[in-house]
Amino acid sequence: MAVFDKVKCIGTAGEKPVLEGFDDAFSRYNKEEYVLFPGFCDVHVHFREPGFSYKETILTGAQAAAASGYTAVCTMPNLNPVPDSLAHLQPQLDLIREAPVSVLPYGSITVGEKGANLSDLEGLAPYVVGFSDDGVGVADEGLMREAMQRCKALGKLIAGHCEDMRYEDPREREWREIERNIRLADETGCAFHVCHISTAESVSIIREAKRSGVDVTCETAPHYLLLNQRLVQDHGRFKMNPPIHTVEDQAALLEALTDGTVDMIATDHAPHSAEEKSRGFEKSLNGIVGLETAFPTLYSALVGDGILGLEELIALMSAKPRSRFELPAGGDFTIWDLEAEDSIDPARFRSKGRSTPFEGWPVLGRCLLTVHNGKAIYDSEEN
Ligand code: DOR
């Protein structure tokens, strides 16, 4: 049994992880110049299987996660079939058993994510991490109220893609539905998590709701923290939903990250084929990949510029999402060389998706080893 006693441990509450076997990995990576973190956790990824495996499979998505320090991911339900019943979830349950990281599926809130009837929430509850209709909002207030009442009884969280299409302006679409869902969460007592917030108004509403004691948390994604409209180019790799907003929105999100209003960073890893992302900004599909760029870009830009401490960043990528979604960290960990200079090169991604606004960014940080359930699921020397 080998104890990782030389590497600097960040975010492991003073514990020095232990590895059984893997003597080679131990001698390579138990070095003072390396840093060990608890395994990262991403509560918002699209692995596209079943239904769209030309974009990503559970295996390719999980390999991208492992190579980037993640040991747990939660998969969104905009699939075919949509997991709105146990029968429709079953194909995903069969596939995730083979994945190198923990893959925790969401069930859909409504049948087919169509917003008309509720899914079999009770039948799905034992097998899902929570419920979401990610990709679309739930327009019908009565339906969302009933979903929250039933999720409250089931002890399950709702992760809301908030976008009320009755409004023209993308910012208003977001904050209007957040405001309504927070009101419903307050009324029903349901645990509510807001997906990918992107505007200053969303930050203010969530900050206020937390102050008044509503059981609400939220995530934002690296692209909303690191980019703003001035940096957006006419290319599909800048196209996602919600879109990137102003410098002021970016500043509000960064402030929310440091004052605790934003609870976690999730990537919204949303791969599409090269062709689907090659149609220019207007016509390309919404979605960019995120797993393989998240830590190096956030570390280089936020920790590097003194906006966020390294411990805080790690908490936002590991302890905080695990705590809200009740996912134990176990002995999972990842070891990084934070001095390694690199640049974001989509050709080296394990994901089938290659479209990222961070292409070509110079970054610091290279993932050396990722361990999940006592097993090395990624070793940079062997891959
Ligand atoms: O950019 C996005 N891509 N936003 C979404 O809401 C859905 C996602 C996807 O599934 O591609």
Image: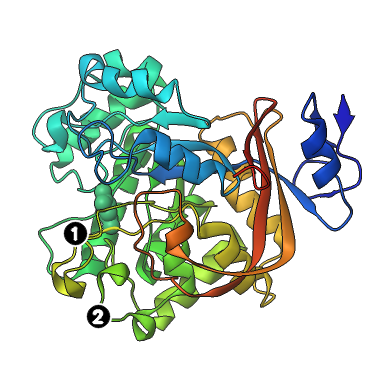
Q: Quadrant of the N terminus?
A: top right
**Residue pictured at 36% horizontal, 41% vertical:** 159
- Locate residue 283 relative to residue 216 in the image: left or right: left
Tell which of 343 and 198 is nearer to you. 343
**Residue pictured at 65% horizontal, 50% vertical:** 315
Q: Quadrant of the C terminus?
A: top right
Residue 234, numbered label: 2
What residue did someone put label 1 on?
Answer: 276
- Locate residue 367 relative to residue 284 in the image: left or right: right
Is residue 45 visible to us here?
yes
> Label 2: few (<14), some or many (≥20) within 10 Å?
few
Estimate the spatial distance between the alpha carbons at disc 1 and disc 2, rounded to whole Å: 15 Å
Q: Position of residue 234 (x, y in %)?
A: 24, 80
Q: Is residue 111 above or below residue 55?
A: above
Name which residue type carries label 1. Answer: Glu
Q: Give SS at disc 2.
A: loop
Number of the front mark, 1 or 2: 1
Q: Quadrant of residue 38?
A: top right
Which residue, as the protein is rendered here, is positioned at the far front?
382
Q: Give SS at disc 1.
A: loop
Tell which of 87 and 193 is nearer to you. 87
Which of pointers 1 and 2 lies earlier in the amino acid sequence?
A: 2
Is residue 191 visible to us here?
no
Residue 49, numbered label: none
> Label 1: few (<14), some or many (≥20) within 10 Å?
some
Q: Position of residue 364 (x, y in %)?
A: 65, 68
Q: Position of residue 254 (x, y in %)?
A: 53, 70
